[in-house]
Image: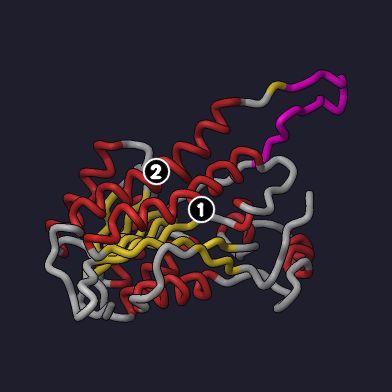
Amino acid sequence: MNIEGIAAVVTGAASGLGEATARALAAKGAKVAVFDRDADKGEKVASEIGGIFCECDVTSDEKVAAAFAKARAAHGQERVLVNCAGVANAVKTVGRDKATGEIKFYPMHQFELAIAINLVGSFRCIAHSAAGVVTLDPLGPDGERGAIVNTASVAAEDGQIGQAAYSASKGGVLAMTLPIARDVMNDGVRVNTILPGVFKTPMVAMMPANVQEALGAQVPFPKRLGQADEYARLACFIVETPYLNAESIRLDGGIRMAPR
């Protein structure tokens, strides 16, 4: 698919991987809608790339529908959706208070939040977007109408200690890639997923320099943290490559995560 001139939606686009992707799509000529809960950062990104900001909470049917309606009113029906909105947490299934030895029960609201944002939120946006994409006229000889790119994580396959909720949510994103691709294949919509490794996201960037260096040193090659623009380049490549469908791609420098 030629990105120039198409409408695109990127969730979680006010920072990190989503911001880089929104900027990369806009640089290739796309009309980009920046979906995020952070209005200040989202408005800034949208202004800088000539896009539109749509405040969006992916856990809400009403807010997702309103965000898509606003984006389509400005740019027309999107052909591209990139899901980057997500949250990470780390809690062991069974914890113990170091001072008292008391056993701590897993805070279930944290597990449910990870699933609600990372998995259900991604699917909610997919369903809203696909319902509109299938109404469009096909493009080119293949009859392609649109492309969806989801964000899972290497934790979907290499979950570490404390990542039960995060791994479950990202594993769900990984697992639903093929069936969703099959659901929409006859309508000319492609669905693929990226599994990022250890990237220099805003959360990681807040860590001390020595911690970031230690994380990067765990990567086989190159021995560094992933850069957001590397994710964005892969997302654009997926959109631009019609034969790439129902695939899940690790972008991780060859790392396989240890237990901790």
Instruction: Say what amino acid the circle numbered 1 marks.
Output: Leu
In the rendered view, does 125 fall on the left or right side of 101? left
Can residue 97 be found in the magenta stretch? Answer: yes
Residue span colored magenta:
90-104
Q: Residue at x 62, y 57 (%)?
A: 154
Where residue 206 appears, x then y in whole percent? 64, 57
Colour setting: secondary structure
Q: Which residue is drawn at 50% across and 50% down?
A: 175
Q: How would you classify the magenta stretch by its main secondary structure?
A: loop
Please state which of residues 67 and 112 is positioned toward the viewer in this rendering: 112
Is residue 53 something that shows in the picture?
A: yes
Q: In which quarter of the image is residue 215?
A: bottom right
Secondary structure at badge 2 equals: helix
Can residue 24 be found in the magenta stretch? Answer: no
Where residue 186 appears, x then y in whole percent? 24, 60
Residue 126 drawn above or below residue 94: below
- What is the tally of numbered marks visible in this picture? 2
In the rendered view, does 81 fall on the left or right side of 132? right
Where residue 165 appears, x then y in whole percent? 60, 38
Near mark 2 (Cα within 10 A), the count class, few <14, some 14-19 or many ≥20, is many
List the residue tagged with mark 1: 174
List the residue tagged with mark 2: 121
Please state which of residues 213 and 174 is positioned toward the viewer in this rendering: 174
Q: In which quarter of the image is residue 243?
A: bottom left
Q: Residue at x 55, y 61 (%)?
A: 195
Tag 2–tag 1 contact (CB < 8 Å): no
- Which quadrant: the N terminus? bottom left
Instruction: Say what amino acid the circle numbered 2 marks.
Output: Gly
**Real-space Cα separation, disc 2 to disc 1, in angstroms:** 14 Å
